[in-house]
Image (cartoon, rainbow, N blue to C red):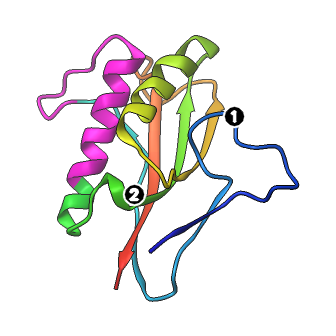
Amino acid sequence: MHKPLSPANIHPPFAPYSHAMEVSSRSRIVFCSGQLGVAPDGSVPPDCAGQARLCFDNIAAILNEAAMGLKDVVRINAYVTGREHLQPYMQVRNELFTEPFPASTLMIVAGFARPEFVVEIEVVAASPG
């Protein structure tokens, strides 16, 4: 089992995430490349929430290949292209994850390879070996 780490002597997380997640050394670990909000048919939703849902759908499909799921995610790195995308991204993330929350970083970046993309998400997942 993974253990969230939230020391009492530092400020608590600003949202539903853990400061850190401890993973047993006997775990299987999957490192997912950054996923963009693109559907199998190549379509891209115009909004951040739609793209974020597709990012997490793509991540779930990748983890399924390793007999894992979003419940096994211990680390999320997310990137958005503007402050206006922070809340829509966080709303989707918060709908999908429950305690123990994964460690999470959210950054604003200048852009991605194609201008229609506004969010990219990468994760690390771990499950018992």
Closer to us: 117 or 51: 51
Q: Which residues are magenta?
A: 39-61
Q: Name the side, left or right, on which 37 lies relative to 67.
A: right
1 or 2: tag closer to the N-terminus? 1
Name which residue lies at 41% across and 23% down: 117
Tell me the quarter of the picture where residue 96 sits.
Answer: top left
Q: Amino acid at mark 2?
A: Cys
Q: Is residue 29 left or right of residue 18?
A: left
Viewer-closest of 114 and 103: 103
Vertical placement of 42 versus 64: above or below?
above
Spatial CA distance of label 1 from label 2 is: 25 Å
Please name which of the two marks, 1 or 2, marks the residue nearer to the observer: 1
Residue lying at 50% horizontally and 27% vertically, measured from the top left: 90
Q: Looking at the image, which residue is at 71% across and 57% down? A: 6
Residue under label 1 = 14
Magenta stretch: helix, strand or loop mostly: helix
Label at residue 32: 2
Determine whether 10 is above or below 83 in the image: below
Neighbor class of circle 2 (other Cα within 10 Å; few <14, some 14-19, many 20+) is: some
In the image: residue 27, left or right of residue 24: left
Residue 14, quarter of picture:
top right
The quarter in which the N terminus is drawn is: bottom left
Q: What's under tag 1, amino acid-wise? A: Phe
Callout 1 secondary element: loop
Q: Position of residue 11 (x, y in %)?
A: 82, 43
